[in-house]
Image (cartoon, helix red, strand yellow):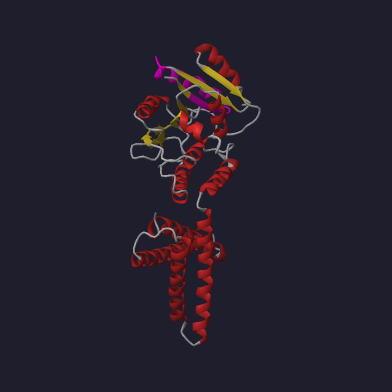
């Protein structure tokens, strides 16, 4: 059985030989090939990879003229591959090659896709700052919310093994070939895959710098939006805007009849909550009919109360402890409250 390992590289010369040595040690006696796809690294990664090919054998080097990203590197490597199974991993030593045999074992057991996940109970993360780790967790969570087809814990993983026929089936459907996360493309464009996630220890980078930058983030956002339920999110946001107008209308109407502000405000809020619930139930989430009407109504009231409290607390924390500008503090509070309401509505009130 032939195995193909694809290593996208950009300025990874200092990490490459140790990785190659560990791969050969781990896969001793097995049939495999390594395809290194380099995006014209200024540090001479491609040239050094060719030297390693002469030294170790089994190494194919593809040098491209410019930086095109991991997704296209994977596809370029795939088109030159011969393996029954395809492994993608980073060349920066953050993905331990010692996990490859376990990936192969699960592919042999009938799984179509085996993902080395950073976010399982037994996983450990040594190579990310707290901010990067938190950001990755939140983005992974949002992907599962907004792209219901994707259910894995770590859709951002760059370390996985997949059967050849899976890529043969999806590679022409892939939209973001210059993107950063090819796994999202595979998951979004496949049906009924048998998937296994395994834990691993994400290591600290030894040499070089992370390739994550603003362009990568923008491409990832575009990718998520393209595959997400964006029309439903737009509907949800429009309902929220209509609810605000309803709230203000009834507040002014009740005040014009002489009601005290605290009474008029409470009634207006309740009317707007009911308005939003009914519009979301019969329009935004009209295809999600599971669950009793009253149960969903109660959950939505609780969620709306929670998001209002979070909005209020956030606004005050920002104003009194971070930045003393009422408008900015309130806007941030509103956005966070909206996000909580959005996630709760998708995940709890009108869950699939």
Image x and y of residue 126, in percent: 42, 35
Judged from this view, the residue extending furthest toward the right is 65
Q: Is residue 21 magenta?
A: yes
| Residue that appears at 58% across and 34% down | 69
Give whichever of 328, 87 is nearer the camera. 87
Is residue 312 visible in the rendered image? The answer is no
| Residue that appears at 50% across and 19% down | 17
Image x and y of residue 66, in percent: 65, 30
Judged from this view, the residue extending furthest toward the top is 55
Is residue 261 visible in the rendered image? The answer is yes
Image x and y of residue 172, in percent: 56, 35
Quadrant position of the N terminus in the picture: top left
Give whichever of 40, 222 is nearer the camera. 222
Describe residue 39's horizontal placement relative to residue 166 as left or right.
right
First to last magenta residue range: 5-30
Q: Is residue 79 above or below residue 335?
A: above
């Amino acid at each position: 059985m032939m195995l193909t390992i694809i290593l996208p590289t950009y300025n990874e010369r200092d990490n490459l030989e140790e990785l190659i040595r560990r791969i050969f040690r781990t896969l001793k006696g097995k049939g495999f090939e390594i395809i290194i796809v380099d995006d014209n690294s200024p540090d001479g990664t491609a040239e050094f990879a060719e030297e390693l090919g002469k030294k170790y054998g089994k190494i194919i080097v593809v040098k491209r003229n410019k930086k095109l990203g991991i997704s296209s590197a994977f596809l370029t490597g795939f088109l030159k591959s011969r393996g029954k199974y395809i492994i993608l991993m980073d060349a920066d030593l953050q993905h331990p090659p010692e996990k490859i045999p376990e990936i192969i074992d699960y592919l042999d057991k009938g799984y179509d896709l085996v993902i080395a996940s950073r976010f399982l109970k037994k996983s450990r993360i040594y190579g990310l700052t707290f901010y990067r780790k938190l950001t990755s967790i939140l983005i992974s969570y949002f992907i599962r919310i907004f792209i219901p087809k994707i259910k894995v814990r770590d859709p951002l993983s760059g370390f996985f093994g997949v059967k050849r026929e899976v890529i043969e089936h999806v590679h022409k459907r892939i939209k973001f070939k210059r993107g950063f996360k090819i796994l999202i493309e595979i998951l979004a464009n496949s049906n009924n895959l048998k998937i296994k996630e395994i834990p691993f220890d994400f290591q600290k980078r030894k040499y070089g710098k992370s390739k994550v930058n603003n362009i990568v983030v923008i491409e990832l956002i575009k990718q998520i939006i393209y595959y997400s339920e964006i029309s439903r999110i737009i509907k949800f946001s429009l309902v929220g805007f209509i609810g605000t107008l309803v709230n203000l209308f009834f507040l002014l109407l009740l005040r014009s009849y002489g009601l005290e502000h605290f009474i008029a405000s409470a009634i207006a809020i309740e009317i707007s909550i009911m308005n939003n619930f009914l519009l979301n139930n019969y329009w935004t989430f009209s295809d999600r009919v599971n669950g009793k009407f009253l149960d969903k109504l109660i959950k939505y009231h609780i969620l709306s109360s929670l998001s209002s409290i979070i909005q209020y607390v956030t606004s005050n924390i920002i104003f009194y402890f971070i930045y003393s500008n009422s408008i900015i503090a309130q806007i941030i509070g509103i956005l966070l409250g909206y996000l909580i309401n959005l996630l709760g509505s998708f995940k709890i009130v009108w869950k699939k």
